[in-house]
Amino acid sequence: MEKDLDKKLYNDYLNGQKDAFEFLYNKYKKRIEYFIFNIVRNYEEAEDIAQDVFIYVMQNKMKENVSFKYYIYMVAKSRAINHIKTEKRRTEITEKYLHDFDNNIEKDILQFITEEETKTEVAEAINLLDEKYKNAIFLVKIEGLSYEETSKILGQTLQNTKNLIHRGKKELRKILLEKGYKEMNKVVKVFIIIITITVLLSGIVYATTVIYNNYIKNNTNHKININPSYQSTLDEHTINNLWVGTLDLAWKELESTLGKSKIELEEGNLPIVDELNKSEFSKENLNSNDYSIDIQKHEMGGYTINAELKKHLNFLEAFDDFSDYTRNITFGNGENYIKYFGINHASSKELDKNVEILFFNSKDGMKSNDFAVKLFTKEGDEIILYRTDDEKNIKEYYEDVIKKSDSYTGTKEFGGEDELLIPFVRANGMINYNELFGKYIKDSWGQFFRDVVQNVNFSLNNEGCDLESTATIVTEVLSVSMKPRYCYFNDKFVIIMKEKNSETPYFVLKVDNDDILEKVDEISEPKIVDYSKENSERYQVPKVETLFFEDENYKYYFPENKSHCLYVYFPDGSHNMVEAALRRGTITIDLLDKYEVEYIKKEK
């Protein structure tokens, strides 16, 4: 998609849409400077060479069978080497010219992005890489070029390039893990490494940065997956999955903002788009005090939509904490001992009012794999816990609870010898829906998805429940891909003037031809014409200096052999000789300066 977009922009530029190249320039400017810097080792020189690269690319069409990215990096390499040759530093051009890199590169190259602590750590990690890996990793893993394209740019064999990438990735991962990422699970480690390197070398949107800072840095339990919509399926392949309605809220807000009943992609919908389109969850399902939706329109088009949900719930009475008594109780087939809370025979009867049994389907009346309870909170929200082995989607789970609860004939009051055991839960998750990146929204004037990100922090304990979740959708508009509307009033048109709340205009003008239109050769300010230049045979110039005007301090002369046949024309159609206009005060000497009329000024 990115390759196609770059090529389309470049072709649009070649076909006369000059603004198309501005997008490519902004996208690649810092990347090309970074690449060139690795060769010339001087940032100011890298900036200058990068400008030459863009000028060359603008003036010289690339071959049809290559990508724009490959083309511009090949030009960048060629220009950088030519620069070194011009500076008579041939000895610096060796097979390792790409490997010499200043240890403080982030101070020169990366300061324009951010000084955040975490990103600086990764910048330092990149600088700790062996010099021979840097540009190879940059071109393949950040710029997305193929191994073959990268090998040609670097002047390496294909196999050598693959070896550089493989070894470089291992080294980078080792450095990052040694710098404090050991406490994270494997999936998050990889995600953080990819995201942070991308931030350093190619930039990333605000949404992901905020979620990274507020979520990843402050939490350590990330073993959770997030489902995009209310209809998402939870089966044996989806372990520890959750759904929260923030993405549904943001999606519906995007639909409303774009004036659509549903979002469709130009290239055909993805499963996630179909799921979100048919989602039945909306802000009407929430108390307005518990959520917020913020919409920001970008200066160049596109939107940032943030949907946030916060819940802080307290049980009617705090349940008993059994952590000290359940040290030998695991969960399912797990090997770890789990913290639990709830109610047993020694608990206060006041706790019974926290709970309602929705249904309890059992053969022996004591144990069951099919039951559900409802927990009550001071805030009025209800928490339903459903024990089941069924594999269904989220909506079906809830429908089952309602159906089974309605048909249950047993007592729903919790009490007597009933017991309740609930594990402490803490789940933190984040997901970037990368499959939507770069996808164009159908009939939206060039709007495409830049980022779709969602995070959640959830905890359930003996006192209550806390939930915080944010979903962010970022769209952008690529103006050059829009189908422009040319509002050219260059033929018959009508001018209508009316007061704001009036239904009847007070002025109407129909323009049928150019009789009442200002012409290009008409003037809006005084204009000087030298007729001797237009007709030298008719207007003879004097061979001596000629006085044409004087004021209190100076006398003004035309030089010898210079014209004094100057006329000034006024917007009202009148005209006069310059000398007369100066004496009457209808013009000043400044007008002669404006039209570069030669004269001599002498003090009296």
Image (cartoon, grey):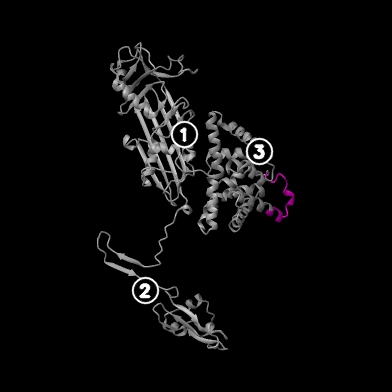
Circle nearer the N terminus (1, 3): 3
Dividing the picture into quarters, in which one does residue 341 lie?
A: top left
Which residue does the numbered mark 1 point to in the structure image?
430
Q: Is residue 406 left or right of residue 9?
A: left
408 relative to 277, above or below: above
Can the viewer see residue 442 in this picture?
yes
Circle nearer the N terminus (1, 2): 1
Q: CA distance from mark 2 to mark 3?
A: 71 Å
Residue type marked 3: Lys
Can the viewer see residue 462 in this picture?
no
Q: Mark 1–mark 3 contact, CB under 8 Å?
A: no
Furthest-right residue in this view: 91
Is residue 85 covered in magenta?
A: yes
Nearer to us: label 1 or label 3: 3
User: In the structure shown, which secondary structural element does the residue marked by tag 1 occupy?
Assistant: strand
Residue 94 on image: x %, y %: 73, 46
Which residue does the numbered mark 3 point to in the structure image?
162
Residue type marked 2: Ile
Residue 516 is labelled as 2
Dividing the picture into quarters, in which one does residue 520 lie?
A: bottom left
Q: Is residue 563 left or right of residue 381?
A: right
Q: Which residue is drawn at the image coordinates 56% and 31% (left, top)?
A: 180
User: In the structure shown, which secondary structural element does the residue marked by tag 3 occupy?
Assistant: helix
